[in-house]
Image (cartoon, helix red, strand yellow):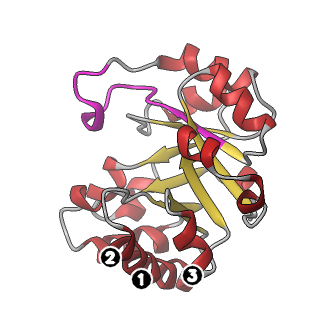
Amino acid sequence: MTMSAYRIICVTNRRLAENDFLEQLEKIASAGVDAVILREKDLDIQAYENLAEYAAKICKRHQVPLILHTYAETAERIGIRRIHLSYKDFESLNVQRRSRFDDIGVSVHSAEEAAAAWKAGASCLTAGHIFATDCKKGVLPRGLSFLEEICRSVRIPVYAIGGISPENAQSCIRAGAAGVCLMSSLMRAEPPGDFLKRF
């Protein structure tokens, strides 16, 4: 499955999981998400690699693509050919290393960043935060007009992130997004399958 085929992407945050994180990830992977981004970028590289190995087994068991975040070296070491990076990290990833990945996603916060990432070889983008979210308390959301601008500036899939719910997901698709990213809601959903049916 290529990144253009994704509709719902789970972005992890183990600190939001009310139950055991790996158990929650197992439930999410079995519930029908199209991909998982293992975001835990606060971990040091060794702790992240250990977690990524467990996550890879879970995702493989349920045939869900796993996308690692930030740590390109870890992805290479454990044989994951999908990576998601901040715009700054993407800029600093040399062309030779970029070529080792089948898919590279990039987080962007302006149309200029979006166009530059696309032209430099990004496979898809995440754009946000679109709606108000507890993860960005006190920070104004960028809104649907921002999402539309990002989508118009590139010819690769754009995924909306930030405050996405069953009630507003379709407005993101109408704005041009290929799909949506869910973090808090999926980390806390019990059971995740019932929650995903609402999309």
Amino acid carrying label 2: it is Leu
Q: Which region of the structure is painted magenta?
A: 125-139
The residue most toward the left is 18
- Tell me how far mark 2 sits from mark 3, CA to CA: 18 Å
In front here: 44 or 81? 44
- Label 3 crowding class (10 Å Cα cut-off): few <14, some 14-19, many 20+? few
Residue on which the image places disc 2: 22
Relative to 19, say whether 179 is above or below.
above
For numbered disc 3, what is the local secondary structure? helix
Amino acid carrying label 1: it is Tyr
All told, the count of numbered labels is: 3
Residue on which the image places disc 1: 54
Q: Do the numbered discs 1 and 2 sit on residues whose CB atoms are within 8 Å?
A: yes
Of badges 2 and 3, the one in the foreground is 3
> Is 177 covered by the magenta stretch?
no
In front here: 99 or 134? 99
- Closer to the chain start, of discs 1 and 2, is 2
Amino acid carrying label 3: it is Ile
Q: Is residue 173 left or right of residue 188?
A: right
- Closer to the chain start, of discs 1 and 3, is 1
Residue 6 is tagged as: none
Q: Residue at x 62, y 74 (%)?
A: 76
Across and down, in percent, residue 178 comes to 68, 40
Q: Residue at x 32, y 76 (%)?
A: 22
- Tell me how far mark 1 sits from mark 2, CA to CA: 8 Å
Of badges 1 and 2, the one in the foreground is 1
Relative to 49, say whether 2 is above or below.
above
- Tell me how far mark 1 sits from mark 3, CA to CA: 11 Å
Residue 78 is tagged as: 3
Q: Residue at x 52, y 72 (%)?
A: 74
Q: Do the numbered discs 1 and 3 sit on residues whose CB atoms are within 8 Å?
A: no
